[in-house]
Image (cartoon, grey):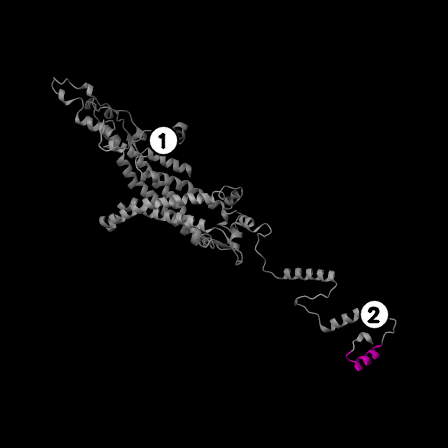
Amino acid sequence: MKRILISLIFTLSFVSSAFAQSTAAPDRNATGGAQTLEDIMARQRGEEVDNSFRSDATGDAARAAEISKQLGTLGGNSDPELWRALRFGSADITASNSGPAAEVLIQDGGMSWLNLRAGPLIKYGGGLLLWVIGLLGLFYLIRGRIKIDGEKTGRKITRFKAAERFSHWLLAGSFLLLGATGLITLMGRKFLIPTFGHEAFSVLAIGSKWIHNNVSWAFIIALVLIFVFWVVDNIPHRTDINWLLKGGGIFSRGHPPAKKFNAGQKLIFWSVIVLGGSISVSGISLLFPFQFEMFAATFAKVNAIGLGTYLGFGELREVLAPHEEMQYAQLWHSVVSFVLMAIILAHIYIGSMGMEGAYDAMGSGEVEEQWAREHHSLWVEEVLGPQVPHAPLSTDKKPVAKAAKKSAAELAKVADAPITFAPTPKKKSKTQSVKLAEVKAKKAAAPKSAKPTATKANAKKTTAAKPKKPASET
């Protein structure tokens, strides 16, 4: 991703003629040193044309004729030479207002920037967003919504506090507004004016510009807040490698163990921080134009380390006009915004309709325990303690009943007390209980009693005569 972004900005720097294909200088003797037809054709083919024969021909006051001679009062600069000096930025200009941009009357690279902004930027940037939306729709049709695999417990775990959720929604809301107003500003001239007319678009464009310029500060503040809240939990961990190798379980059942943020969420976080930070810096330079020379200084550092040559772009231009700085800032701002919007579209899909239970994390701040165990099992262990099992609790009650029965029997044996169980599937009959009581009574009375054992007949008579007395007294 970083290499792609670097290549994009390097490509933008070659819009000017500095990196066009060079050709051999034609013979200009026939034109008296002026440009030839071959110069014009080469420029139309996008090739580099050595303009030194024009940029250097801006006149010389020292060559002016003496004031007393013919044409001496005209000086050493003709009108064409003056306009060439204005175009190539070598004219001695004094402006009534201050600032570097005030002394630039003709900016030669403006049309290249305008063509790139109105053509490839809209085409490929808009195409990227449409492609991501289509890909997410296709994924939903194939995979469907990612459900919670196990049985829900009904218990909740606090995942994000109110301050964290506020920062998240401040960032999300401001980014959506900035994205919408930015697209209106960039694409409105091409798509909205033909549809709604100039007057309607004028009102919409003015409102979009005001919202974009002011809501940007909320985005920057929220970006700082989420960095402070979550940077510690988004430091890469060795478990992230396993998560990435298994694709996060998105394409199969079961999810790899993960901490509070899995590898996918960490990629989203650092994309927002890095790309969002870059968008903020370039946006500030656009809010305060001609105050920062970011790209000329960046190109100088890139040339110093040889990165441009390594990527095959050669040396970058280190001297840029004030307007060129703004044009590069606007192009970079738009390119990085398109990339971040594509990433956020995927994030919005997973956090809403793409995964069951995911929205609750930022909605109420509490998530279903089973969802947390499946997607962030290591984090659940940190929150609830290591004694909590990772697997869902079993719904089979038979092993639990056996364990409870065994434990009760052991306690009863120690206390030498009768054992009483909860109702079990099989109960002893009354006849079995009576026989067991008679056997215990005989064993207890045999060694102590010297009296002869009563016969069955006597026992029956005694029992019949005295029904209230127990059988042990016979």
Give the number of the disc on residue 65: none
Q: Main secondary structure of the magenta part?
A: helix
Label 2 environment density (alpha carbons within 10 Å; few <14, some 14–19, many ≥20)? few
Q: CA distance from mark 2 to mark 1?
A: 109 Å
Q: Is residue 471 above or below residue 362?
A: below
Amino acid type assigned to the residue bearing label 1 in the image: Ala
Using the image as rendered, state which of residue 167 and residue 181 is in the foreground. Answer: 167
Q: Which residue is mark 1?
A: 297
Residue at position x 31%, y 47% in the image: 211
In which quadrant of the rendered image does the C terminus lie?
A: bottom right
Residue at position x 66%, y 59% in the image: 403
Please give left or right for residue 224 compared with residue 96 in the image: right
Residue at position x 18%, y 27% in the image: 80
Q: Which residue is mark 2?
A: 445
Residue 133: image location, x then y, percent: 38, 49
Using the image as rendered, state which of residue 454 and residue 120 is in the foreground. Answer: 454
Please give left or right for residue 457 compared with residue 21 in the image: right
Which picture quadrant has residue 312? top left
Residue 222: image location, x then y, percent: 40, 45
Q: Is residue 309 visible?
A: yes
Residue stretch in magenta:
455-468
Please give left or right for residue 342 compared with residue 445 in the image: left
Residue at position x 83%, y 70% in the image: 445
Labels 2 & 1 near each other (Cβ < 8 A): no
Please give left or right for residue 78 compared with residue 150 in the image: left
Residue 391: image location, x then y, percent: 57, 53
First in residue order: circle 2 vs circle 1:
1
Amino acid type assigned to the residue bearing label 2 in the image: Ala
